[in-house]
């Protein structure tokens, strides 16, 4: 009898949750729709959309308890009582804004809202109907002796049978008990189906769990890669570069007092040390430019434009972003400028950038690199790779697209024959 009691309690709980929920949703939806023209109703509509989240937590817990066998004793490691795993991801940043943006973009939020609406207007009336069908008639039959004792005269049980004695009332009560036991089986089947529907709509999907794990692991890898890049840059700057500077100074001082037969050799060694120092500085700049860390992406793009072999006009005003976003965007711009210099035959290039609202990710950083070259860049079918401007292979577009894809970024290429070529890069920020 334990399981039928649990299933009965599950359906009773559905009625107790669904009845007030339907009233609350009606009030929120009606007020939100009525007041939305004056913008006051928009928070109410947002609250309506997010109402499925707490309902989902409650319903997952109820369905989880329904499946677990009853136990008398709970050990310290028993999982009973703990909330089952939810389908939602943890926001990357603290605060209400990042949390709300993430919740509105997750499919689980809308599945929970669909279940909430279904519970409020369909499921709990069905639960109440099933409970009434199972317990109303057997209850009336079971209480026949009590009804007879209270009335003191003959009674009509369930408005069907006339009863005027206790033997007859007891027989009807026994029939009511048998009928109740028989009806508990369909009640159990309905409750199981009801809980299965809740699990289908509310339980985390395997693909969502794996996607969340992959997204989090990829973010950790990107952060670790950027930290390692900066460590290498710092070690080269503070170690090898300083020693080369000291060596160059010592060679310069040695030339002052060197005999004529050694002066030429010291001068050549001094020049080579200066050349190695310059190459090392370029290497350090390529690993992680100091201007990017100190002043941000806008100044770093301007610095890259100054170093370009093709004259570049820059129209960039950007705020600071995370290290991963700034690094990916900066090196993508450098690679794009290298492609312009190597393949396009352009006499001039232009860079513009900004931050705009995105479709699913909130803000998006966009950067356009345009040149007046001969065009003909041909992206491959698998992405923005393939041949570069002029139809030449090895342009680096594939690597550029892969660099952006690590952060869910995209690369669009518009390069008709004869030019111009426009590369548009977008990164969620």
Image (cartoon, helix red, strand yellow):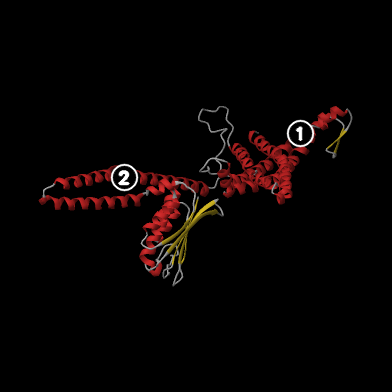
Residue at point 62%, 42% (across, down):
53
Vertical side of 274 occupied by 167: above or below: above
Q: Is residue 243 visible?
A: yes
Q: Which mark is residue 237?
A: 2
How far apart, in angstroms, are the residues tagged by discs 2 and 1? 92 Å
Q: Which mark is residue 37?
A: none
Disc 1 secondary structure class = helix
Q: Nearer the viewer, residue 313 or 336?
A: 313
Q: Quadrant of residue 246?
A: top left
Q: Quadrant of residue 152?
A: top right
Residue at point 63%, 40% (across, down):
54
Q: Is residue 247 left or right of residue 236?
A: left
Residue 425 location (% of width, % of height): 47, 58
Sequence order check: which comes first, mark 2 or mark 1? 1
Q: Which residue is mark 1?
A: 174
| Residues packed near mark 1 inside 10 Å, few (<14), some (14 to 19) or many (20 plus) | some
Taking the view exactly as shown, the residue that stands out farthest to the bottom is 418
Q: Quadrant of the N terminus?
A: top right
Residue at point 11%, 51% (across, down):
260
Taking the view exactly as shown, the residue that stands out farthest to the front is 256
Of badges 2 and 1, nearer the viewer stands 2
């Amino acid at each position: 009898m334990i399981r039928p009691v649990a299933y009965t309690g599950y359906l009773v709980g559905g009625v107790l949750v669904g009845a007030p929920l339907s009233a609350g949703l009606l009030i929120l939806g009606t007020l939100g729709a009525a007041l939305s023209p004056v913008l006051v109703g928009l928070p109410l509509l947002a609250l309506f959309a997010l109402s499925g989240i707490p309902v989902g937590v409650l319903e997952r817990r109820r369905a989880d308890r329904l499946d677990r066998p009853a136990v008398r004793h709970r050990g310290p490691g028993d999982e009973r009582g703990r909330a089952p795993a939810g389908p939602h991801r943890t926001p990357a940043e603290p605060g209400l804004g990042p949390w709300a943006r993430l919740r509105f973009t997750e499919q689980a939020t809308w599945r929970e809202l669909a279940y909430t609406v279904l519970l409020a207007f369909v499921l709990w009336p069905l639960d109440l109907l099933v409970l009434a069908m199972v317990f109303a008639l057997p209850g009336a039959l079971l209480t026949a002796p009590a009804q007879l004792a209270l009335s003191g005269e003959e009674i009509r049980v369930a408005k069907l049978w006339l009863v005027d004695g206790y033997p007859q009332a007891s027989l009807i009560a026994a029939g009511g008990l048998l009928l109740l036991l028989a009806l508990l089986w369909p009640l159990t089947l309905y409750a199981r189906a009801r809980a299965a529907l809740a699990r289908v709509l509310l339980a985390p999907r395997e693909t969502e769990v794996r996607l969340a794990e992959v997204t989090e692991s990829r973010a950790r890898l990107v952060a670790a890669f950027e930290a390692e890049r900066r460590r290498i840059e710092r070690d080269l700057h503070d170690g090898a570069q300083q020693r080369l500077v000291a060596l160059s100074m010592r060679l310069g001082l040695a030339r002052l007092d060197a005999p004529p037969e050694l002066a030429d050799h010291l001068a050549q060694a001094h020049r080579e040390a200066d050349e190695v120092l310059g190459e090392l500085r370029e290497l350090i700049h390529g690993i992680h430019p100091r201007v990017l860390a100190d002043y941000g992406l806008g100044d770093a793009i301007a610095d890259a434009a100054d170093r370009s072999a093709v004259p570049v006009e820059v129209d960039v005003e950007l705020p600071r972003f995370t290290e991963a976003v700034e690094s990916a965007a900066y090196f993508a711009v450098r690679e794009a400028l290298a492609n312009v210099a190597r393949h396009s035959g352009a006499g001039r290039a232009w860079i513009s950038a900004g931050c705009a609202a995105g479709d699913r990710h909130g803000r998006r950083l966009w950067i356009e690199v345009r040149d007046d070259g001969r065009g003909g860049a041909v992206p491959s079918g698998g992405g923005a790779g393939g041949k570069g401007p002029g139809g030449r292979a090895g342009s680096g577009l594939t690597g550029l697209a892969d660099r952006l894809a690590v952060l869910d970024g995209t690369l669009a290429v518009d390069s008709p024959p004869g030019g111009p070529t426009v590369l548009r890069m977008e990164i969620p920020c």
